[in-house]
Image (cartoon, rainbow, N blue to C red):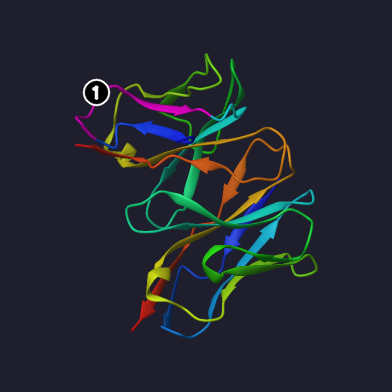
Amino acid sequence: NAGVTQTPKFQVLKTGQSMTLQCAQDMNHEYMSWYRQDPGMGLRLIHYSVGAGITDQGEVPNGYNVSRSTTEDFPLRLLSAAPSQTSVYFCASSPRQGNDGYTFGSGTRLTVV
Amino acid sequence: AQSVTQLDSHVSVSEGTPVLLRCNYSSSYSPSLFWYVQHPNKGLQLLLKYTSAATLVKGINGFEAEFKKSETSFHLTKPSAHMSDAAEYFCVVRGDSSASKIIFGSGTRLSIRP
């Protein structure tokens, strides 16, 4: 089925560990974004990309890195995990033009202990 | 710049009564507006969207929303609540049709009383 695939679904990290959250879409969408969801705060934009090779910071980028080497993939890297990064992470994609909303992945629940 | 404010963090209604979830937006452009729903421990699903065609937009599961430019509002309604409507609802603004970012409201949790 076409859509946005996120892996893993659950992850527990120790403080200071690094990891990469994977995101892939098969809809040939130019735009891709990463959000984190925390209670009472909605979804906040971490990083986004308007195409392969182009990324930019969102509202809460500190502690996260991204790259976009292909249209399909947009991994999110935590360089040194902190308890404040405990959250649910969503990846989303959208075509560049058009009035459709974003398509979201099913999320990754990350706990940093 | 754009922003969106959801006026209620929690709404509780009885099954079979109307639902009203309020959303106000701010945008420098003619915005696209969306409502998403998130059921517990699930991802986000698009309920409906406004993209400058009709101001009254119908979505899935009997929900609809009306775009009111003069009031900068995009409130979500449903005539009769069902237990399965219990979820978190997010109002979202996209500045224009090629905008690379969308902005989320803080969400409204809808509870349904039997």
The N terminus of chain A, quarter of image:
top left
Q: Which residue is mark 1?
A: A17
Res A100 → quadrant: top right
Seen in the image, is A15 located left or right of residue B42? left
Q: Is residue B97 above or below residue B77?
A: above
Q: How many marks?
A: 1
Q: Nearer the viewer, residue B11 or A101?
A: A101
**Residue A55 location, x and y as percent?**
58, 22
Q: Is residue A40 above or below residue B96?
A: below
> SS of the residue at dot 1?
loop
Residue A22 is inside the magenta segment? yes
**Residue A44 location, x and y as percent?**
49, 44
The C terminus of chain A, quarter of image:
top left
User: Which residue is at a point 48% across and 24% down the rendered structure image?
Assistant: A74
**Part of the protein shown in magenta:** A11-26
Res A110 → quadrant: top left
| Main SS of residues in magenta | strand
User: Which residue is at a point 43% across and 39% down the rendered structure image?
Assistant: A105
Chain bearing tag 1 is A
User: Which residue is at a point 60% across and 29% down the rendered structure image?
Assistant: A29
Q: Is residue A16 above or below residue B18?
A: above
